[in-house]
Image (cartoon, rainbow, N blue to C red):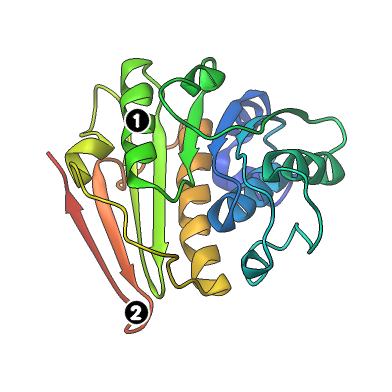
């Protein structure tokens, strides 16, 4: 049985929930590629993917589903990747940037995973998720430092409470593929917990990871 080894963790009922869930992925870059892969292999079969960028050679150290010269939007390539991993999956690919004007693509999702690289877009995603009662799993990474926050509307603070009006840094951020995969794995674990109806101590906490010195800190945001 495909999910035999994870059912003892998520339970049979939890596995059924995972397989019937609809998951939104905002951003199909380094975090998104890893989260998508983790969730498909965990049993998620319904995805809404959002990313208008096309692959660039500088992406390839951490975004392993793309290749140089492919000018298709990342959302379309990622949708093809999902179907290669599970041909019965249902995927909506939206090759457009996320904003408050395009946010309605995620209506009907059970959770949204934030894999964006813009703080302004993240704030709009947080506002949309809060207004529509959709849990949000945020992740971010710069070099060897990353963070994760799990937002559950009505239960926790919002991502806007965490970051406020923080501005985007100028220029591209340094990125190590393995470090990106580490934060994406944390997001994936929390997404699976939410989908399966499992408890989690991460909800409402900003968890920061320093992979240089391997220190992990968490702070509840109120």
| Above/below status of 213 relative to 194 | below
- Which residue is more in the foreground, 206 or 31? 31
What is the quadrant of residue 88 in the picture? top right
Q: What is the secondary structure assignment of the residue under circle 2?
A: loop
Residues at discs 1 and 2 in contact (Cβ within 8 Å): no
Apparent side of residue 210 relative to residue 137 in the rendered image (left or right): left
Which residue does the image show at 25% across and 52% down from the upper left?
206
| Above/below status of 64 relative to 49 | below
Callout 2 crowding tier (Cα within 10 Å): few <14, some 14–19, many ≥20: few
Which residue does the image show at 20% across and 34% down from the upper left?
157
- Which residue is more in the foreground, 145 or 85? 145
Q: Mark 1 points at which residue?
A: 124
Callout 1 crowding tier (Cα within 10 Å): few <14, some 14–19, many ≥20: some
Apparent side of residue 4 relative to residue 161 in the rendered image (left or right): right
Which residue does the image show at 39% across and 45% down from the upper left?
138
Cα–Cα span, label 1 and label 2: 31 Å
The spot of residue 104 in percent (x, y) is 50, 17
- Which residue is more in the foreground, 203 or 122? 122
Q: Name the residue under label 2.
A: 214
| Above/below status of 221 relative to 90 | below
């Amino acid at each position: 049985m495909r999910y035999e080894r994870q059912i003892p963790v998520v339970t049979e009922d939890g596995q059924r929930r995972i397989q019937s869930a609809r998951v939104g992925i905002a951003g199909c870059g380094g975090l998104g590629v890893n989260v998508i892969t983790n969730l498909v292999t965990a049993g998620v079969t319904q995805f809404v993917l959002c990313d208008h960028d096309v692959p660039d050679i500088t992406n390839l150290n951490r975004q392993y589903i793309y290749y140089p010269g492919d000018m298709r939007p990342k959302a379309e390539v990622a949708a093809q990747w999902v179907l290669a991993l599970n041909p019965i999956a249902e995927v909506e690919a939206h090759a457009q940037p996320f904003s408050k004007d395009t946010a309605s693509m995620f209506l009907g999702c059970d959770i949204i995973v934030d894999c964006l690289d813009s703080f302004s877009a993240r704030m709009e995603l947080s506002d949309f998720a809060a207004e529509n009662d959709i849990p949000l799993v945020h992740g971010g990474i710069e070099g060897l430092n990353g963070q994760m926050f799990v937002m559950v509307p009505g239960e926790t603070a919002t991502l806007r409470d965490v970051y406020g009006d923080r501005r985007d840094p100028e220029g591209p951020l340094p990125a190590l593929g393995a470090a990106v995969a580490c934060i994406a794995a944390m997001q994936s674990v929390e997404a699976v917990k939410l989908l399966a109806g499992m408890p989690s101590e991460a909800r409402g906490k900003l968890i920061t990871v320093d992979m240089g010195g391997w220190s992990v800190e968490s702070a509840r945001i109120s």
